[in-house]
Amino acid sequence: MSEHDSATELAAEDLPSGPVPVLAVVGRPNVGKSTLVNRILGRREAVVEDVPGVTRDRVSYDAEWNGRAFTVVDTGGWDPDARGLAERIAAQAEIAVSLADATLFVVDATVGITDADEEVVKILRRSGKPVILAANKVDDERAEAEAYGLWNLGLGEPYVVSALHGRGSGDLLDAVLAVLPEPPAVSEREYGGPRRVAIVGRPNVGKSSLLNKLAGEERVVVDNVAGTTVDPVDELVELGGRTWRFVDTAGIRKRVKEASGHEYYAWLRTSTAIERAEVCVLVLDGQESIAEQDVRILQAVRESGRALVIAFNKWDLVDEERRYYLDREIERDLVQVQWAPRINITAKTGWHIDRLVPAIDKALEGWETRVTTGALNAFLGRLVAEHPHPVRSGKQPKVLFGTQASTAPPTFVLFTSGKLDAGYERFIERRLREEFGFVGTPIVITVKPREKRKR
């Protein structure tokens, strides 16, 4: 593999179940940490935009290089003199360093060493962990010469890289592997592993507050600025005596076509989080009308075939009049997902968040429900006898046989004598739910009409 080849993504299924070594990526805002993380991962995963401090939380990704798995933690821009929100981002970075096995310290070679960099070096030295120094934005020989001035930081050899163009990334990754501990040899992934839950919804509906309340500590930067969470943050949370992997996703403000810069990538990240999850918790603000963006997120969850729970947050602020209108909105806007469990919560105070786990369990159970071929065909036989398909152009298609091809989501294949009306397919789906449950999960029905034999 040449140095221009980026490290490839490691599917969750292939990860060893033992503890994988952790690499924290730190540095001042706008030195190109997220671009470098993307180069390491080989995909546009971290939110990248030419605005300092877009990455606000520590965000972990699975990576692999030369057959070895490790976790990359991308931290918020680290400025030791920060105040307010920036100060809390710095605290996130300190947490990341304390959790990591090694640190990749990224410096902008075109700017050189700043006072802030020297402060960061002191903190890194205190951590006692191995540090790899990356001199980023080295796009030509002149910049390379300047980069060697970074020896003065006392962190050893600076590895010159261009995160944007991939230059030097192979040598850098080799150096990273040299200081990361070897993961324990594990032959098989621990069966099952924590269930993956994505918290999705528009900005400022309380997704981060919900995750913080569940986790029992302030893990996610929460500010009452709409859209504070720009990247998803995976957190392992102990709930109801079990461990869950929660992904707190970026809020979605606009249609993708209208979204600028990091909002566009945040939408991509939300889509990725939905794809990576098994069940999605859609958080809606109970005070506000169900918006077009909420419906778009719902469609994304349905199309990805994930289990779904709907949580109406800020319920303490919902009065009788609002409840009346909300009931009408649910009938109108959530008609496609009537099967999803709904709960009312107040994330800020923790009111009723104990209802979340039973709702998630119910949705996952529906998502993984399997109906035997015998039971399915007995049901289809009764259904077709009681409610035959309407006659169309003198023909009446019949359902001959059905089978459940897979679960997660439940997928059915129906063999028929002709094409079924979309309305009749919806009728079959509705009756399947009445008969077998399937709470909290979309159902996929594929119809295979019998081909006419040529004489």
Image (cartoon, rainbow, N blue to C red):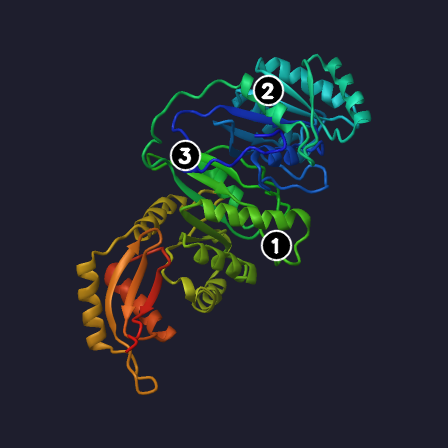
Q: Secondary structure at mark 2?
A: helix
Depth order, front residue of 292/21: 21
The residue sitting at the right extreme is: 142
Q: Secondary structure at mark 3?
A: helix
| Tags 3 and 2 touching, CB below 8 Å | no
Q: In the rendered view of the protein, which quadrant contains the C terminus?
A: bottom left
| Residue behind mark 1 | 253
Q: Is residue 145 found left or right of 31 in the rendered image?
A: right
Q: Which mark is residue 391?
A: none
Amino acid type, residue under disc 1 in the picture:
Arg
Q: Secondary structure at mark 1?
A: loop
Amino acid type, residue under disc 3 in the picture:
Asp
Relative height, residue 307 to residue 428 (above, below): above
Q: CA distance from mark 3 to mark 1?
A: 34 Å
**Residue shown at 45%/25% (left/top)?**
20
**Residue shown at 42%/24% (left/top)?**
19
Q: Is residue 273 visible?
A: yes
Q: Which mark is residue 14?
A: 3
Amino acid type, residue under disc 2 in the picture:
Ala
Relative height, residue 181 to residue 213 (above, below): above
Q: CA distance from mark 2 to mark 1?
A: 40 Å
Q: Quadrant of residue 148?
A: top right
Badge nearest the viewer, 2 or 1: 2
| Residue behind mark 2 | 175
x, y percentage for residue 351?
Answer: 43, 45
